[in-house]
Amino acid sequence: MIRENAPFSGADALCLMSAAELARGYADGSLSPVEVARAAMDRAEAINPVFNAFTLIDRAGAELAAAESARRWKEGAPLSPVDGVPTTLKDIVQVRGWPVRYGSTVTPDAPWQVDAPAVALLRAAGCVFIGQTTTPEFGWKAVTDSRLCGVTRNPWNADRTSGGSSGGAAVAAATGAGVFHLGTDGGGSIRVPASFCGISGLKPTFGRVPAYPASAFGTVAHVGPMTRSAGDSLAMLRAMSGRDLADWNQGAGRLDPLDAVDAPLKGARIGIWMTPPSGRLDAGVRAAVEAALPVLSEPGADVAGPVTLPGGDLLDLFHQHWFTGAAARLAAVAEAAWGAVDPGFLGVAAEGARIPATDLVRAQVRRAEFGAAMDWLLAEYDFIVSPAVSVPAFGAGLEVPERSGLARWTEWAGFSYPINLSQQPAATLCCGFTPDGLPVGLQIVGARGADARVLSAAACIEAALAARG
């Protein structure tokens, strides 16, 4: 959805092209990966002093990679359809030649020697890495600020948070500083900032995108794409998906192919989920989502009405997984350095350290029961549609909205963390705006493996909303 005050207003036209448009221009010679990469980096440098989305911009590396891409396209031998697409990588995935700090002052400031699997796949596809984006320390919360990098701000209103933990990636996408943006999502860290910044994002089916080293937060943590459209998210997902033997958690199961689905909403049975397991739904968010729901039935979907998630106290269940993960991550940091760590992270790690092992095992059993119940629910429904986040973007530098009475980010992220527990694909798209002009995200959840169907449905909804104006 486009507004006059959109964050990308005033950006070079090269910064707003889709991956498919760039490929056509590269193929016919009307565009060069070099000029596109330069435009993206110029944009990154222009927006960074205001929004603080980047930890580094790699001009030398990107210029070299873009020149090699230009040569391949000229020879008619691109590595993939996304060869030459400007791409950013979150400061939580290892990148050869870059320091990766996890948003922390207590990690080594030295270049990595190898790429994480998803990064290696994007590099092998010819993507041009233009820079690294911000994260809170160890990606522990759904807003983006750290002692290492400061506060990342919302491109629609710099007084508001970008969301997190992939906040820098969301800002980069929203402002036109790159086309593909790699994010991670352990409890909403792709979908929350995508919603707050008005872009597209996908938490894929767990295992679709390989990850190594394994996250301290375990198998609630996913790697996925963040872009300006569902079509670009699907193109990026294709490039970063695959089997990597280093990722034992990935498993060896077969996933549905990533082919776009024609008429994904026609005849689809859709459940509407409007009551989160924690927190309250903001009135402005509710109004924007409800105003968008009629577009679901226009292509012939059967909007079946409200659904309630199974599983009992999902907030407590998620906390037992997330907080023990934080404790495990903190244990890898020398105790003498804990004074330099985010106090909020120290707090949840301390809570996690107090959880008995027997309680954690019981939580894992409860999670398996919840996941199976969600699989059954998504055998009954083709999609579950909900708000992406219960609240709009609030004050920058805060973990919870002002005067909300909430203690932790998880309490307002009730539409996202359950789907990390159950591992289904969940896409976010901008469906409208609050009365004060902040984006509102719509979430679409599908069955495990049905990532392409979910993103195809998101693309249909994006097109329908755009046609409304």
Image (cartoon, grey):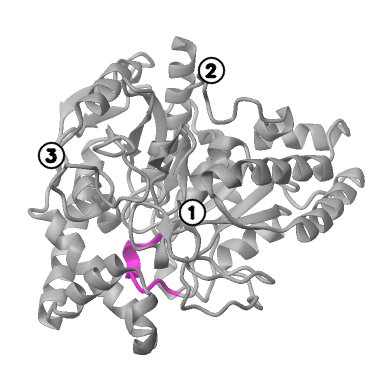
Q: Give the residue at mark 3.
A: 308
Q: Mark number for residue 405?
A: none
Image quadrant of residue 157?
top left
Foreground of the two, 286 or 337: 337
Chain-order first, disc 1 or disc 3: 1
Q: Residue furthest top?
A: 468
Q: Is residue 327 left or right of residue 99?
A: left
Q: Is residue 10 left or right of residue 371?
A: right
Could you classify mark 2 by the number of other residues whose Cα lies within 10 Å: few (under 14), some (14-19), or many (20 or more)?
few
| Residue 242 visible somewhere in the drawing | yes
Identify residue type, mark 2: Glu
Q: Give the residue at mark 1.
A: 183
Q: Give the residue at mark 2.
A: 4
Residue name at image x 33 percent, y 69 percent:
217
User: Gap between marks 2 and 1, in whole Å?
Assistant: 27 Å
User: Gap between marks 1 and 3, in whole Å?
Assistant: 28 Å
Residue 35 drawn at (x, y percent): 82, 40
Q: Do callouts 2 and 1 mark residues in contact (Cβ within 8 Å)?
A: no
Numbered disc 2: secondary structure: loop
Q: Nearer the viewer, mark 1 or mark 3?
A: 1
Numbered disc 1: secondary structure: strand
Numbered disc 3: secondary structure: loop
In the image, the segment drawn in magenta is 214-222
Image quadrant of residue 380?
top left
Query: Magenta includes 221?
Result: yes
Residue 27 drawn at (x, y percent): 83, 36
